[in-house]
Image: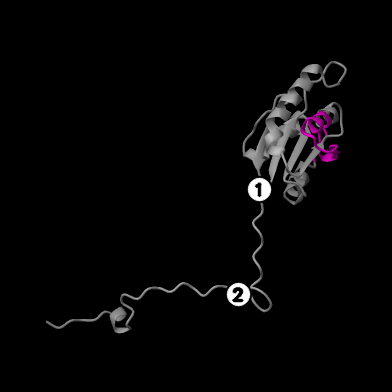
Amino acid sequence: MVEQKTQAQEKGVVGAVAQPPAPRQFGKDRLAEPEPIRQMKKIVVMRHGHCNEHDQISDYGKQQVEHAAEMLRELVAGKNVLILTSPTCWVPPTAKLLGEKLGIAEPKEDERLGMGSRDLGRLADELPKMDADVVILVTHQPEACALSSWLHQGSRNLKNGEFVMADL
């Protein structure tokens, strides 16, 4: 019986172990250094606390904010946190109280979070570039719903004092 050799046997590679590729060289005239792995950014969208008939945050609204702060405390501990707030009505007092309860610097007002804003898309585009580990957006109902839909790929109506959170 005549044995027939396969092409692999003729080339002498049968039973050979594949060698791993040579390690990449970094530095001058070589491959660029790899970019460091970036931590996920947390985005929190919060609807303002309940307000009273005088368009001010009510005692119940303050309780809602305190409850939200308790739930967010562990998330923000030791992190670089930025709070952006709508400049209108009772939203800034909600954001300020949240910041106080979390021990975070004064919130920054952002017109794009205002009622009837048409600039939410621009704000959403800028979120990944913001210099913060956690960005908390405090706003009104239509804007909170739109932002939470963008984050979660589905509609979510937020009640007063509620928030949603996502990784970005």
Residues tagged 1 and 2 counted as in contact (Cβ below 8 A): no
Vertical arrangement, residue 11 with respect to residue 157, above or below: below
Q: Which residues are magenta?
A: 96-118
Above or below 7: residue 50 = above
**Which tag, 1 or 2, sits closer to the chain's start?**
2
The residue sitting at 67% across, 74% down in the picture is 27
In reply to whether residue 120 is colored magenta, the answer given is no
Horizontal and vertical percent for residue 166?
65, 40
Which color scheme did the rendering employ for the protein?
one colour
Using the image as rendered, state which of residue 64 and residue 27 is in the foreground: 27
Q: Looking at the rendered structure, which numbered label has been put on residue 25?
A: 2
Look at 62% across and 36% down and name the residue there.
154
Q: Which residue is mark 1?
A: 40
Residue at 66%, 68% (x, y): give it: 33
Q: Residue at x 76, y 37 (%)?
A: 137
Which residue lies most toward the left here?
1
Relative height, residue 79 to residue 69 (above, below): below
Q: Secondary structure at mark 1?
A: loop
- Front disc: 1 or 2: 2
Amino acid carrying label 1: it is Met
Determine which quarter of the picture holds residue 157. Answer: top right
Which quadrant, please, contains the N terminus? bottom left
> Label for residue 84?
none
Q: Amino acid at mark 2?
A: Gln
Q: Residues within 10 Å of mark 2 (few under 14, many from 20)?
A: few
For marks 1 and 2, give the CA distance: 28 Å
- Location of residue 75 in the rendering, given as x and y in whole percent from the top left corner: 68, 37
- Residue 109 included in the magenta stretch of the image: yes
Report x, y in % for residue 91.
82, 29
Query: Which of the 4 image quarters holds residue 78?
Result: top right
